[in-house]
Image (tube, grey):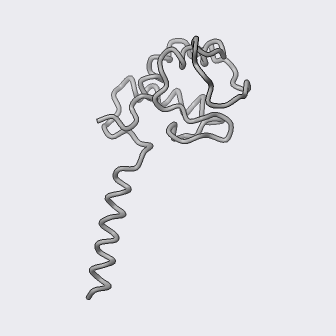
Amino acid sequence: MKRTFSIMVGGAMLLSLLSCQKGEPQKPLSTLEARGKATFMSNCIACHNPNPTIDGSIGPAIAGSSLELVTARVLTRSYPPGYKPKRDTEVMPDFPQLKDDIPALHAYLNSFNKP
């Protein structure tokens, strides 16, 4: 009986921890965020982790990135003034064809762990 209780308590604690896990938006995605997710999955996951809160094989975690950073990196491979890169690499190509998708991509990257 004591063992059964311990297993039940342990299971409840595990479920509680998993529900607080980083990495997934806590609310359904808006239309703009869903478009950004599609853009991210189609263009970014070759280097960045499919979960943007986690570092990728080449690119860093990018959840929460500012609009200025997303715009600069996607369009010109540069950084906004005063920004210190997370990694000292210059392998990211530019994606000028994504100019119209930047607001959606930014919205998706900022949808993580928001109430």
> Picture coordinates of residue 3 (x, y %)?
32, 85
> Picture coordinates of residue 22 (x, y %)?
42, 45
Q: Residue at the location (62% across, 40% down)?
A: 56
> Picture coordinates of residue 52 (x, y %)?
52, 36
Residue 31 picture quarter: top left
On-image quarter of the N terminus: bottom left
Residue 111 as seen in the image, left or right of residue 83 = left
| Above-or-below relation of 46 to 39 | below
Residue 112 picture quarter: top left
Q: Residue at the location (53% across, 31% down)?
A: 62
Residue 115 as seen in the image, left or right of residue 73 = left
Q: How many numbered markers are drawn?
A: 0
Which is nearer the eye, 49 or 3? Answer: 3
| Above-or-below relation of 25 to 72 | below
On-image quarter of the C terminus: top left
* Residue at the far bottom in the pictured view: 1
> Picture coordinates of residue 104 (x, y %)?
44, 21
| Above-or-below relation of 87 to 82 | below
Q: Residue at the location (32% across, 64% down)?
A: 13
